Amino acid sequence: MKEQWERKRAIIAALNTGGFVSGELLANQAGISRAAIGKHIASLEEYGIEVFSVKGKGYKLASKISLIDESRLKNEINHRCFYFDEIPSTNAFFLKNVEDLNSGDICVAEYQSAGRGRRGRSWVSPYGCHLYCSMYWNLSQGMAKAAGLSLVVACSLVKVLESFGIEGVGVKWPNDIYLNDKKLAGVLIEMSGQADGHCHLVIGIGINISMSKGQGEKIDQPWSDLSDLTVGLSKTDLMIALQKQLFVDLTEFELAGMKPFLLRWQDVDIFYGKEVKLLMGENQVFGVCRGIDETGAILLESGGRVEAFVGGEITLRSAT
C-alpha cells in the first residue's frame, strides 16, 4: 500500500505543474508502463481527484493539490503527529487509541473513507483537496466541564484563518465556520470518560481548501473553500498554526472556562444582533441573537427578555 501511494503522490506532483502531461512522460518518470499510469489515474479519480484526459495531450488536474509535508509537520509540532494518505476517519483512529495519547497530539489524513460531521452526516473527503485532522485533549475536570468546547475550537479556527489574511470568516452557533455566508469548515467533538473524572476528547476538524465541481455537487448546503483567496496556501503551514492555536486556547479553556472567549465569539458571530429562529424538532423560537453565555448556550432576546438555549438537536437559521 505504501509503494502504491508513493507512486500516486509522484504522479500528483508531476501533474501539479498546472498543464497537460503526457502518459509517456509520467510512465518514464515513474518507471512503469503507460497502462499502469492509466490505472493509477483511474484510482485517483476514485479517491475524488478530478483529472482531465485529452488524447494527444495527456493528463491534467482540474485544480492543484496541496499535500501535507509530513517531515515538516512532525519537526515543527512539539507533539506526536500521525499522518495517513488514507484512513476511514481521523476521529475514529484517535478514539480507538485514547489511552496512548497526550493532549495536543494530532492525526492528519489526505483522504477519509468514512469522514463524519455532526448528527451522523457524512463529510465529503476527496484525497488531498482539503484539510482533515483530529486533535486529542485530556480534560482533567471531566465531561461536565466540556460544555462550550466546540465554540472555543471555532474561535481558534477563525483566528488562524485570519492570520493567513483570509477575510470574511465568521462563526455560526454552535461550531460551524462560514466564509462569505457559506460553510467553510466544521467541527466534530467526541468524548469518552466520566462526568467528574478524566475525560478523553477527540476534536475533529474539516476545512475546505479546494473543492472540485464534482465533489461540490455531493454537498447538500451552500459551501465555500479557500481556492480563490489563498494563492499558494501551504496546508502544512495551516495545520501547524492550527495545532499551536488550539493548544493555547484549550489550555486557557481548561483553566478559565468559556469566559475569555465570549467577546471573541461575539466579534465573529455572523448572526449577532440579527433576527434568527431556532428549530427544535417541530417547534420554532424567534428572537434577536445576543451571542452566547458561559455554558456555550445561544442567547435570544424576545419580548424584552433574554433566554438561553442549548442542545444537540437545535438548528440556528436566519429569520428572514
Image (tube, grey):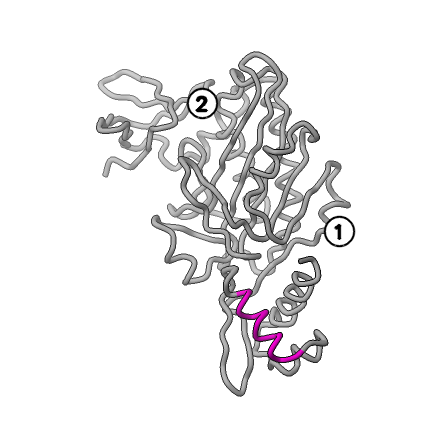
Magenta stretch encompasses residue 34: yes
Query: Which amino acid type is marked by label 1?
Result: Ser
Give the magenta range: 33-44
Q: Is residue 137 above or below residue 184?
A: above
Q: Is residue 130 above or below residue 270?
A: below
Whether the residues at callouts 1 and 2 have beta carbons within 8 Å, the answer is: no
Q: Give the residue at x 46% y 51%.
A: 124
Q: Residue under circle 1?
A: 71
Name the chief secondary structure element in magenta: helix
Question: Horizontal and vertical percent for residue 302?
Answer: 25, 21
Magenta stretch encompasses residue 204: no
Question: Horizontal and vertical percent for residue 61?
Answer: 54, 70
Q: CA distance from mark 1 to mark 2?
A: 37 Å
Query: For this view, does 273 lie left or right of residue 100?
Result: left
**Nearer the observer, 165 or 8:** 8
Query: For this view, does 224 lie left or right of residue 166?
Result: left
- The crowding category of the residue bearing disc 2, from other C-alpha atoms within 10 Å (few below 14, some 14 to 19, many at least 20), is many
Q: Residue under circle 2?
A: 296
User: From this viewpoint, which residue is outermost toward the bottom?
Assistant: 56
Q: Give the residue at x 48% y 30%.
A: 151
Instruction: Say which element carries label 1.
Output: helix
Q: Is residue 191 above or below residue 19?
A: above
Q: Nearer the viewer, mark 1 or mark 2?
A: 1
Q: Give the residue at x 52% y 19%.
A: 259
